[in-house]
Image (spheres, helix red, strand yellow):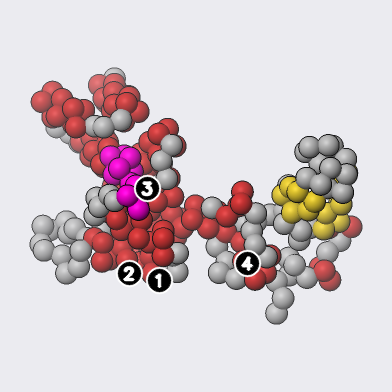
């Protein structure tokens, strides 16, 4: 069966349209399934601004269906991977809502820090969700390491090899010239510390000044320190 979105029998009068070239502003005709076209006036090639690449972000047959995806959307599959990883982590923890909540908090801080510091957010977020998956709340020795469990999850999600290796390297804090994850390692550590600080601020017993000083002193980025100050100010209000 052909994808209905690409099958012309399902098209209507809005499926063929003109878009102004961003360079010379002359009209260029697009079919709804054109990923990009070249302007016949100035020879500038540009992406179809009306095309929805949503399905291509997760479909394993995207390139066969649409051809080579434009560079602007090539990272969409990696960006969407974090959502799939989040679902798998919830399934792994089952009813352990404390650990599910902790993973979500680490990921939230990781995303904020990653965007602020210009890090590889897709890799950072996947690692943030997975960073505590090999540990047990009871303190017992886990059957498999965090990296081994993460590898299993990412493999089942058909993650690209480069992405899988980068996430696992980040989880292992294994920075090499090939991975170049020094920044992401620091930010993942900051995100985990901020999540713990937020959880401590919500507990009945207040966070001691010694604990606060220790946590803040161990943060790497200025943005993490700013977030810590915001957390503490909110807790004391």
In the rendered image, which residue does mark 4 sit on?
63
Q: Camera-side residue: 206 or 42?
A: 42
Q: Camera-side residue: 228 or 187?
A: 187
* Image side of residue 74 versus residue 202, left or right: right
N-terminal-most mark, 3 or 2? 3
> In the rendered structure, are the residues bearing label 4 and label 2 in contact, judged by CB atoms less than 8 Å apart?
no
> In the rendered structure, are the residues bearing label 4 and label 3 in contact, judged by CB atoms less than 8 Å apart?
no
Give the farthest residue toward the bottom.
Answer: 1
Res. 191 visible in picture: no
Q: Secondary structure at mark 3?
A: helix
Displayed quadrant of residue 116:
top left
Label 4 and label 3: CA atoms lie apart by 26 Å
Label 3 environment density (alpha carbons within 10 Å; few <14, some 14–19, many ≥20): many
Which labelled disc corresponds to residue 124? 3
In the rendered image, which residue does mark 1 sit on?
156
Q: How many marks?
A: 4
Displayed quadrant of residue 33:
bottom right
Which labelled disc corresponds to residue 152? 2
Magenta span covers which residues?
Answer: 177-187
**Residue 200's x, y, as percent?**
20, 36
Label 4 and label 1: CA atoms lie apart by 20 Å
Residue at point 68%, 65% (across, down): 66
């Amino acid at each position: 069966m052909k994808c209905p979105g690409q099958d012309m029998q399902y098209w209507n009068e809005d499926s063929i349209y003109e878009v102004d070239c961003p360079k010379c502003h002359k009209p260029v005709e697009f079919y709804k399934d054109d990923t990009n076209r070249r302007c016949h006036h100035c020879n500038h090639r540009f992406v179809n601004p009306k095309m929805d690449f949503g399905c291509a972000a997760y479909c394993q047959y995207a390139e066969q269906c649409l051809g080579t995806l434009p560079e602007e959307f090539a990272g969409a599959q990696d960006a969407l991977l974090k959502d799939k990883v989040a679902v798998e982590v919830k399934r792994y923890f089952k009813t352990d809502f404390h650990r599910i909540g902790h993973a979500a908090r680490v990921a939230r801080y990781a995303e904020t820090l990653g965007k602020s510091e210009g890090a590889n957010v897709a890799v950072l977020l996947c690692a943030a969700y997975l960073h505590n998956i090999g540990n047990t709340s009871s303190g017992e020795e886990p059957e498999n390491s965090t990296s081994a469990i993460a590898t299993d999850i990412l493999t089942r999600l058909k993650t690209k090899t480069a992405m899988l290796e980068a996430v696992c390297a980040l989880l292992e804090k294994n920075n090499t010239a090939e991975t170049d994850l020094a920044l992401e390692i620091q930010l993942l550590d900051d995100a985990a510390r901020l999540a713990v600080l937020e959880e401590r601020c919500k507990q009945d017993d207040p966070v001691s000044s010694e604990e606060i000083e220790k946590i803040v002193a161990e943060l790497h980025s200025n943005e993490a320190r700013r977030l810590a100050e915001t957390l503490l100010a909110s807790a004391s209000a």
